[in-house]
């Protein structure tokens, strides 16, 4: 839980562990007990995943990682990254132009789990705030609690879908996408808030 948020440099501005040097040198196994090198994770996750969310170039795209499973069922589908999950979550290969498109893609390509209680949030490592996390990956964990009601209100005001469901419902929907029983919605970014998603 800590490594993920520190790796995003979420504590650099509040006097916590420094993301730039986290798990480097002699602290490698103490801070980051994982097979993947911290520098590799920072690049793959922070750069490639967060800035290409649900695009074909997203390395966490289930579609790319489970081709064998989908093909064994005789279907080809568009699938989201595991943390974002599926069904009511969108993908788009429309090129992003500017901050507006980037922010829309983060909201449309993510789904929150149940939020709002310290125990629930801690149990999820504060990653139950997927929408807020994708908007601002470099925030400290507790800041997502404060941002969530504002983000939800802004989305409602502008007609942008804000998806929040139980973790169990998201797991079921993810599995349904993995095996080809359900597909992602596909949005054209310029149509969000004006029209229904493309079929």
Image (cartoon, helix red, strand yellow):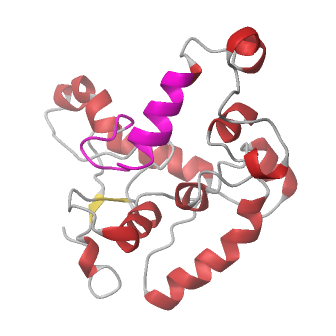
Residue 57 inside the magenta-drawn segment: yes
Residue 179 in sight here:
no
Looking at the image, residue 119 sits to the left or right of residue 65; the answer is right
Q: Residue at x 75, y 20 (%)?
A: 31
Looking at the image, residue 110 sits to the left or right of residue 62; the answer is right
Q: Name the spot of residue 66 as percent of width and height, x first.
A: 30, 28
Residue 20 inside the magenta-drawn segment: no
Q: Foreground: 46 or 185?
A: 46
Q: Residue at x 19, y 25 (%)?
A: 72
Q: Foreground: 42 or 124?
A: 42
Looking at the image, residue 40 sits to the left or right of residue 176; the answer is right
Q: Residue at x 54, y 52 (%)?
A: 169
> On screen, 144 above or below 15?
below
> On screen, 134 above or below 31?
below
Q: Name the spot of residue 124 as percent of width and height, x first.
A: 72, 44
Looking at the image, residue 14 sits to the left or right of residue 190; the answer is right
- Stretch in magenta: 39-60
Q: Quadrant of the C terminus?
A: bottom left
Residue 110 in sight here:
yes
Q: Quadrant of residue 90?
A: bottom left
Q: Name the spot of residue 195 as percent of width and height, x first.
A: 26, 85
Q: Quadrant of the N terminus?
A: top right
Q: Name the spot of residue 91 as percent of width and height, x first.
A: 30, 57
> On screen, 42 above or below 142?
above
Q: How many marks?
A: 0
Q: Residue at x 40, y 59 (%)?
A: 89
């Amino acid at each position: 839980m800590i490594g993920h948020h520190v790796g995003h440099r979420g504590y650099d501005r509040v006097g916590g562990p420094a993301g730039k040097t986290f798990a480097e040198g002699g602290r490698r196994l103490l801070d980051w007990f994982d097979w993947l090198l911290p520098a590799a994770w920072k690049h793959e996750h922070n750069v490639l995943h967060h800035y290409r969310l649900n695009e074909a170039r997203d390395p966490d795209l289930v579609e790319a990682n489970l081709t064998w499973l989908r093909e064994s069922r005789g279907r080809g589908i568009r699938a989201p990254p595991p943390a974002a999950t599926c069904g009511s979550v969108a993908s788009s290969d429309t090129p992003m132009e500017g901050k507006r498109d980037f922010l829309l893609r983060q909201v449309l390509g993510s789904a929150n789990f149940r939020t709002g209680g310290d125990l629930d949030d801690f149990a999820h490592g504060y990653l139950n705030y997927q929408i807020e996390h994708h908007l601002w990956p470099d925030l400290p964990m507790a800041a997502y609690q404060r941002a969530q009601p504002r983000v939800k209100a802004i989305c409602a005001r502008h007609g942008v879908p804000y998806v929040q469901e139980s973790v169990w419902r998201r797991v079921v929907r993810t599995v349904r996408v993995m095996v080809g029983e359900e597909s992602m919605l596909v949005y054209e970014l310029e149509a969000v808030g004006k029209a229904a998603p493309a079929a």
